């Protein structure tokens, strides 16, 4: 009830105040919570998800580090799941009129202090994901609510090479930082990245947690790479649909449904849509979710010394994991 919830919030505030903190990329505080750097704007949301979100067996949870291609994954999962309702992807489809983040919400961004927007919460349960059962989050695997780990729901993790994640984040953050703070230099941002300080980071812990789980429980966690999506989208869309339990039929393949899905969700298509050129999500304008959408832009930003430093860290951290940088 409300009294209990007020107490929960009070306990959360005490806990947050006791955590180590550091000024994050946006110039706001990041809290070191359960082994990861949690931005101040979402930490209460994260706690609320942990305390109240009840996953169901039919749910699908999309997980990423920020700037790993979340928007793309959301578009693909939505298009795959709803393809029978919207067969004519070019003229009438929710993805043509809604930003992918609207269609598949982040659990932690949709729960306020009272957590009243997420399905299954104790007070108000008026929140329904428009897709009914697809949600997304940046929460690292070890901190997910038990119901996600232990129910029959499935998890798709999208990983991207850390060099591009860094560059993408740096650009993204600089568009959202308060003007009074001035831009964050590439050097300062890189130093934070290498120390693991980044929203939901360290990067390597995030990737490794999901990687290990995908090896141990391949039916539970599907591990995808942004670079593979760029290289062989048809194959990856098929993999994703199979994992989601809605494989494409031969008939659909013959009709070119996979290619249509790929086109609908492509960077160029989504970026040019009016809905993605306007509007915003929290501090971020929708258009900033679509920058270049390429693999390897890091060569334009990182010096050889920077590459060497991050190379060394990644080699150490990924050692023997089977996951390559
Ligand atoms: P760049 O900054 O390298 O261009 P997220 O969605 O997790 O915030 O990640 C954003 C990154 O994914 C940005 O990378 C963005 O351009 C890229 N992106 C967004 N939509 C995409 C799409 N449909 N296909 C490929 N990349 C996409």
Image: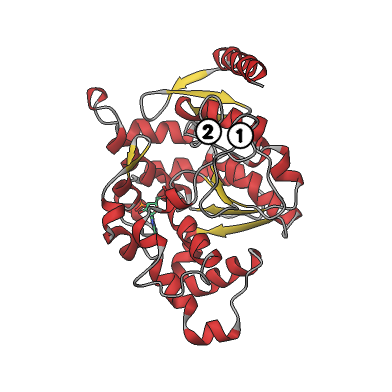
Q: Estimate the x, y position of residue 63 in percent, counting from the top left.
A: 56, 48
Question: Is 257 drawn above or below residue 51 in the view shown?
Answer: below
Mark 1: few, some, or many residues within 10 Å (few <14, many ≥20)?
Answer: many
- Residue placed under numbered mark 2 in the picture: 111
Residue 320 appears in the picture as rendered: no
Percent across and percent down for residue 155 are 64, 52
Q: Quadrant of ligand 1?
A: bottom left
Q: Residues within 10 Å of mark 2 (few under 14, many from 20)?
A: many
Residue position marked by numbered label 1 in the rendering: 49
Horizontally, residue 215 falls left or right of residue 238, namely: right
Describe the element under mark 2 as helix, strand or loop: loop
Residue 178: x, y in percent?
27, 27
Above or below, 41 relative to 265? above
Q: Quadrant of residue 6?
A: top right
Left or right position of 65 against 270: right
Q: Are marks 2 and 1 in contact (CB under 8 Å)?
A: yes
Circle 1 SS class: helix
- Residue at 37% x, 46% y: name it: 168
State which tag comes first along the sequence, 2 or 1: 1
Question: Does 11 sit above or below residue 104?
Answer: above
Q: Residue at x 53, y 69 (%)?
A: 237
């Amino acid at each position: 009830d409300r009294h209990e919830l007020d107490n929960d919030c009070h306990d959360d505030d005490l806990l947050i105040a006791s955590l180590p903190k550091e000024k994050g990329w946006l110039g706001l505080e990041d809290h070191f919570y359960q082994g990861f750097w949690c931005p101040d704007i979402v930490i209460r949301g994260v706690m609320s998800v942990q305390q109240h979100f009840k996953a169901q067996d039919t749910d699908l949870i999309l997980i990423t580090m920020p700037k790993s291609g979340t928007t793309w994954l959301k578009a693909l999962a939505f298009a795959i799941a709803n393809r029978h309702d919207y067969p004519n992807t070019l003229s009438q489809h929710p993805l043509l009129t809604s930003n992918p983040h609207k269609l598949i919400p982040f659990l932690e961004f949709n729960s306020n202090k009272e957590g009243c927007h997420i399905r299954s919460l104790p007070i108000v349960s008026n929140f329904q994901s428009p897709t009914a059962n697809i949600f997304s989050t940046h929460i690292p695997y070890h901190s997910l609510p038990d119901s996600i780990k232990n129910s029959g729901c499935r998890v798709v993790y999208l990983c991207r090479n850390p060099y591009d994640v860094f560059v993408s984040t740096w650009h993204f953050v600089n568009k959202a930082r308060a003007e009074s703070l001035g831009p964050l230099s590439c050097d300062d941002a890189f130093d934070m990245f290498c120390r693991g300080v980044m929203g939901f980071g360290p990067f390597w812990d995030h990737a490794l947690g999901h990687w290990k789980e995908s090896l141990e429980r391949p039916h539970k966690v599907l591990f995808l790479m942004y670079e593979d999506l760029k290289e062989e989208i048809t194959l990856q869309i098929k993999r994703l649909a199979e994992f989601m339990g809605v494989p494409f039929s031969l008939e659909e393949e013959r009709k070119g449904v996979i290619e249509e899905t790929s086109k609908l969700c492509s960077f160029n298509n989504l970026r040019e849509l009016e809905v993605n050129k306007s509007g915003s999500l929290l501090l971020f304008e929708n258009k900033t979710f679509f920058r270049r959408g390429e693999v390897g832009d890091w060569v334009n930003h990182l010096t050889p010394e920077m590459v060497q430093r991050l190379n060394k860290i990644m080699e150490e951290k990924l050692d023997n994991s089977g996951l390559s940088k």
